[in-house]
Image (cartoon, rainbow, N blue to C red):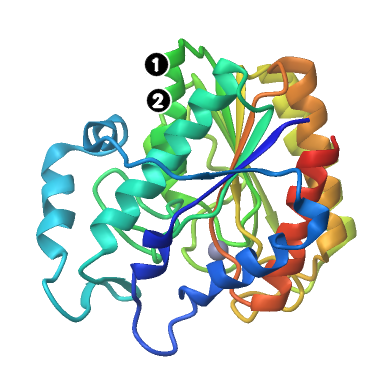
Amino acid sequence: MVTRLYTHPIFLEHITPPGHPERPDRLRAIERVLDDEAFAALDRAEAPGGDEATILYAHPQEFVERVRSAIPETGITRVDADTTASPKSWQAAITAIGAANAAVDDVYRGRADNVFVAARPPGHHAEKTTAMGFCLFNTAAIAARYAQRQHQAERVAIVDWDVHHGNGTQDIFWDDPSVLYCSTHQMPLYPGTGAVSETGAGNIVNAPLAPQTGSEVFRDAFLSRILPALDNFAPDLIIISAGFDAHHRDPLAEINLTEDDFDWATGQLMQRAGRHSDNRLVSLLEGGYDLQGLAFSVAAHVGRLMKG
Ligand SMILES: [Zn+2]
């Protein structure tokens, strides 16, 4: 397996207020753990600048301008109750989109089998017309549509194992059966969406997990709901909304996964990518707020991507 890693220094310059869990140190922790010689074979690349026009694949122009006008010249502004912007946030968000779209190019052009994008801000809470939950634009949704428009992908699956439901991704693809959205998430928890009954055009598969559950319940949700849905859908590309806040150390939720569970889930999705998608798999960092839990989980995830 050739695994590419995209990062960029601009991702450290999206500054959040003191004490905010979604902070630049998250990426520093990931960088440190991937510095180990076990990851020497990673194909490291600097994320390219993004094309602003691709934001329109998932959001209307009016919303793009609203986010642009919220970017301050100095200091930090509030976009919603827990989402903020600093002077470099626009460039960080655009570069995250550029990296995700480049990752799609890479797996389609055979430059990599799979790609992990270590970027921030995250994206899965951003709805068509609402920035929220630390997210400005929905990077995963844009990348899915990019694969359809630029590489003629007919069916794209987004698997979201962040502990929070990806309300934004669900909103964007609610009536679009060409994209399958599958999510495991704690319920009840922010943002409050993600019930089993929310099925969109039959393309939404929500597998809520009760607080204080762990490995067994998570793996059962994968085996009984997510993986059968993927096999049935036969995607041309799998995108992972890879949040690591379901780790037992994470302060924002009460699901008790270990890094072994992320290793396992990665392996399961790689098997499906092998079966349906010519191995094409793109993984985008979402949440994960305990630095040690995040670092160990990313190491397990990327290690599995490299090993196959
Ligand atoms: Zn999350």
* Mark 2 Cα-neighbour bin, 10 Å: few <14, some 14–19, many ≥20: many
- Any mark on residue 244, and which? none
Residue 56 visible in this rendered orientation of the protein: yes
Question: Which x, y percent locates residue 293?
Answer: 72, 73
Please, what is the three-letter code of the amino acid marked with disc 2?
Answer: Tyr
Q: Nearer the viewer, residue 175 or 236?
A: 236
Q: Which residue is mark 2?
A: 146
Labels in figure, total: 2
Q: Are marks 2 and 1 in contact (CB under 8 Å)?
A: yes
Q: Which residue is mark 1?
A: 150
Question: Which x, y percent locates residue 61?
Answer: 14, 38
The quarter in which the C terminus is drawn is top right
Quarter of the rendering containing residue 230: top right
Please, what is the three-letter code of the amino acid marked with disc 1?
Answer: Gln
Q: Nearer the viewer, residue 225 or 86?
A: 86
Residue at 82%, 28% (x, y): give it: 271
Disc 2 versus disc 1: distance between alpha carbons? 6 Å
Quarter of the rendering containing residue 249: bottom right
